Amino acid sequence: MKLREALELIRQARPAGAEQARYLLGCSTTSTHLQTFLQAYLLRQRPELAIEIEAILYGDLLGSLERIQPQGYTGVTVVCEWYDLDPRLGFRRLGGWAPSVFGDIIGGVRAGLGRLQNAIEKISAVVPVVVALPTLPLPPLEISVPAQTVGFEAEVWSPTWEFARWCGSRSGVRLLSPAKTIPSG
């Protein structure tokens, strides 16, 4: 679907007295287009509903998810990127990429995934949750051929896949396939 198609679908009038459905989009970026596409996707699935998408506070995925009251939502979508798990893995807060801190970054990722898991467990007890794992490439922490995985990258993905396994085992939690979310080419 193109942006124009999504906007046209959203602008279409809903039936009078349409049931309200309120969804939360949890991501740490400026989510305008993502909100638009999510709303259009949901409207294609349930055109009889009046769907509203609310986004969390910019730059605070974990904290926002820990604080929400899920009873007010129909469902929650979580888009997690590396910088949500440890800010040093983002490009806006550079620094600390020396090999001597790699272990600390891995610890930060594990801690971030723990917080995310706790928040999702609380939320999914009330409403369905959809989770997207990181799709952005890691910063260039190690020198290697781009197509080659080296030690640090494997160490970061290990707890991430453990978290993915946990998501797959929970009722009320759906994990988007990385094969479908990672852009090709």
Image (cartoon, rainbow, N blue to C red):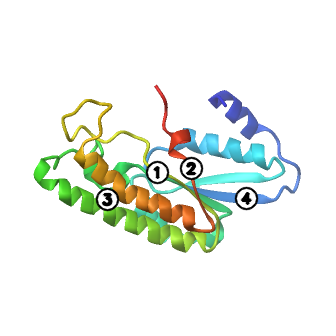
Q: Which residue is mark 3?
A: 109
Amino acid type, residue under disc 4 in the picture: Ala
Going from N to C along the chain, the mark reached first, 4 or 3, is: 4
Q: Position of residue 6 (x, y in %)?
A: 68, 35
10 Å crowding of disc 3: few (<14), some (14-19), many (20+)? many
Going from N to C along the chain, the mark reached first, 1 or 3, is: 3
10 Å crowding of disc 2: few (<14), some (14-19), many (20+)? some
Residue farthest to the top, as pictured: 185
Q: Which residue is mark 4?
A: 21
**Pair 4/3: label in front:** 3
Going from N to C along the chain, the mark reached first, 2 or 1, is: 1
Question: What's the CA distance linking mark 2 and mark 1?
Answer: 7 Å
State the residue at coordinates (55%, 61%): 168
Which residue occupies the foreground of this view, 143 or 96? 143
Q: Is residue 93 visible?
A: no
Q: Which residue is mark 1?
A: 133
Question: What's the CA distance linking mark 1 and mark 3?
Answer: 12 Å
Q: Position of residue 30 (x, y in %)?
A: 46, 44
**Pair 4/1: label in front:** 1
Going from N to C along the chain, the mark reached first, 2 or 3, is: 3
State the residue at coordinates (19%, 58%): 103
Q: Which residue is mark 2?
A: 176
Are the two marked residues, 2 and 3, in contact with CB atoms closer than 8 angstroms?
Answer: no
